């Protein structure tokens, strides 16, 4: 197991800890305690964040066909990105279904934000050399016009 796999386990454990803290609010309610919707929202959001990290650790530490940490991270990032791009609004199912869909999107966004720098570090040099969508020029260039990916 490499450093990246260890890091993904640490992130998953931190997400588990956040979920436990959110659930503790329910467990510690006494007979006169009140559970607020912000408490339920915190639980749903923490659960969704954990689910994305759990997908990564399932790929790296699963029982069948494990992959390296970089592949797992980039694969799950693609799934999270696809969810944000292609999710349709919930039009039936009531407020609970809408709230759960919102927490799914929030969890995906949090996962993408947390893994942004890792994904940039894992980007292949060919990804950096790809033409930008704006002008057809390389995405990263120096003053002399050389691609940084071609320098040694």
Image (cartoon, rainbow, N blue to C red):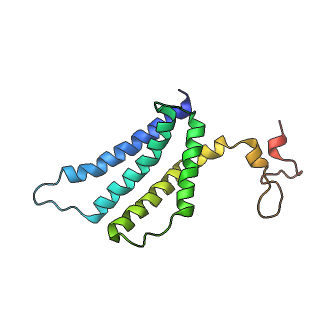
Q: Which residue occupies 88% across, 52% down?
A: 145
Q: Is residue 72 above or below residue 91?
A: above
Q: Is residue 59 above or below residue 135?
A: above
Q: Which residue occupies 60% across, 39% down?
A: 71
- From the viewer's perspective, is 6 left or right of 28? right
Residue closest to the far left: 31
Percent across and percent down for residue 26 are 22, 53
- From the viewer's perspective, is 38 left or right of 123? left
Q: Which residue occupies 54% across, 46% down?
A: 76
Percent across and percent down for residue 104 are 43, 58
**Quadrant (top left, top right, bottom left, bottom right) of the C terminus:** top right
Percent across and percent down for residue 148 are 81, 45
In terms of image quadrants, where is residue 101? bottom left
- From the viewer's perspective, is 116 left or right of 90? right
User: How many numbered badges does the structure rendering display?
Assistant: 0
Q: Nearer the viewer, residue 133 or 67?
A: 67
Residue closest to the far right: 144
Q: Which residue occupies 35% across, 43% down?
A: 17
Residue closest to the far bottom: 91
Percent across and percent down for residue 97 are 36, 65
């Amino acid at each position: 197991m490499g450093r990246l796999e260890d890091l993904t386990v640490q992130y998953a454990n931190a997400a588990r800890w956040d979920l436990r803290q959110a659930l503790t609010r329910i467990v510690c309610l006494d007979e006169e305690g009140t559970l607020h919707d912000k408490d339920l929202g915190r639980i749903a959001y923490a659960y969704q964040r954990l689910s994305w990290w759990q997908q990564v650790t399932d790929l790296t530490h699963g029982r069948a066909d494990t992959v390296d940490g970089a592949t797992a991270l980039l694969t799950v990032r693609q799934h999270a990105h696809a969810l944000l791009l292609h999710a349709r609004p919930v039009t039936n199912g009531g407020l609970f279904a809408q709230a759960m869909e919102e927490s799914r999107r929030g969890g995906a966004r949090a996962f993408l934000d947390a893994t942004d720098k890792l994904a940039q570090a894992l980007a292949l040099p060919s990804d950096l050399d790809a033409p930008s969508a704006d002008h057809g020029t390389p995405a990263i260039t120096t003053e002399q016009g050389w691609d940084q990916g071609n320098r040694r």
